[in-house]
Image (cartoon, grey):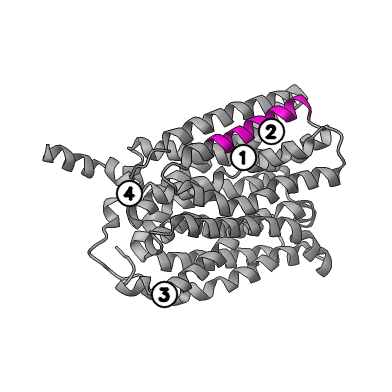
Amino acid sequence: MTSPRPDADAPKTRALVLIGIVLLAFNLRPAASSVGPVLTEIGESLQLSGAESGLLTSLPVLAFAGFGALTPRLARTIGPHRLTLAALVAAIAGLFGRSLVTNSALFLVFSLLALSGMASANVLLPSLVKRHFPNRIGLVTAIYSTTMTIGVTAASVFTVPIAQQYGSWRAGLAAWGLLAVLAVGPWIGLIAHDRPDGNDRPATISMAAVARTRLGWMLALFFGLQSLQAYAVFGWFPNLFRSAGFSATDAGMLLGVITGISIPLAFVVPAITVRPRGVLPLLAVLGACYLIGYTGLLVSPANPALLWALLVGIGTSTFPMVLTLIGLRARTAAGTSALSGFTQSVGYLIAAPGPFLIGLLHDLTDGWTVPLLVLIAIALGLIWAGVMVSRPDAIEDHLPSAQEATAGRR
């Protein structure tokens, strides 16, 4: 087992960790979000079948669920800083590899490699924040979640212009590999901090142990329902707006409003979440925005569509909220790692059917009324799950060893 050296909290080390976290966060989503804008060109060039295209769009969720589940054990074995570096290297190899291949099977393999690295890093971030900034969880989570949102937006906006500038979708994808290379430097400097330390015993906290706790399942449900809605919104709302009479350009701009409003909120929401009495009022506001936005789109989608887009975009800020809660609901880096791995792995499995379900309901009913009613019901479930994890608590208190110790004292 591993933990930081005693000097890990020295100012220079903390500065290096913070730089590493920011660069890492920026690169957590482009492996997934850069494909969609050039999917048509990729399909034509590599002759992707319909099944392969469907698999490609599903790979992010599958990778985040599968490889995310392996991360806590790997972190205990090789150390969180070494694993972060390895995850970045895997992502870089995958990003560059898929931009060079000439057949669909290898493209899928390298895409999975890139996404596996990002999945591991995604799970590691909350535990790294807990390990190095235990008294600044809200602030550091705000910084990295904002950076992550900027990375998503950048990949969505700039992939096509880069591809057009250099005359190929390959350049549009490879550009994000170059940016990922920049993130490697700080983590090379941090691998020496993976040293044995008898004060931390991560081997006693496993995902299997978290799976036997109500807190773990409620947090996973909260994470899963917020991800399900976000994937459904990002995937289908441009079509919804076009059905309401907007042009493709205007529909894209409305989606941009949804994603854009989340950038400043990603910095504000964690700071409110860490306040002892901040979770429930914040949850009420974000949940209400989802419910009002969906209801507005149900009743009058075209007018005022901008208001509905703003409200739904505010609702998606449950994402930085749940990231902050992962760090707050554990006392140790080991507990945070196990809780993060379980929450995100199970959560992404819950989210996976979301876009498919919304699309299927739209096709079956030839409209958006039923899909929006389903999203309203899911938003109510999200609010309920949020209430269940709003009370200050620690996963360590729910593990079998802690319960046995409490019983023994009695």
Give yes or no for contact between labels 2 and 1 (Cβ–Cβ under 8 Å). Answer: yes
Residue that mark 4 sits on: 206
Q: CA distance from mark 1 to mark 4?
A: 32 Å
Residue 393 against residue 380 in the figure, above or below:
below
Residue that mark 1 sits on: 315
Residue that mark 3 sits on: 11
Question: What's the residue at 31%, 43% (across, down)?
Answer: 209
Q: CA distance from mark 3 to mark 4?
A: 31 Å
Q: Residues within 10 Å of mark 2 (few under 14, many from 20)?
A: many
Q: Residues within 10 Å of mark 3 (few under 14, many from 20)?
A: few
Q: CA distance from mark 3 to mark 2?
A: 44 Å
Question: What's the residue at 70%, 51% (across, down)?
Answer: 260
Q: Earlier in the sequence, mark 3 or mark 1?
A: 3
Q: Nearer the viewer, residue 290 or 106?
A: 290
Which amino acid type is shown beneath numbered disc 4? Answer: Ser
Question: What's the residue at 76%, 55% (across, down)?
Answer: 38
Magenta residues? 284-300
Q: How many marks?
A: 4
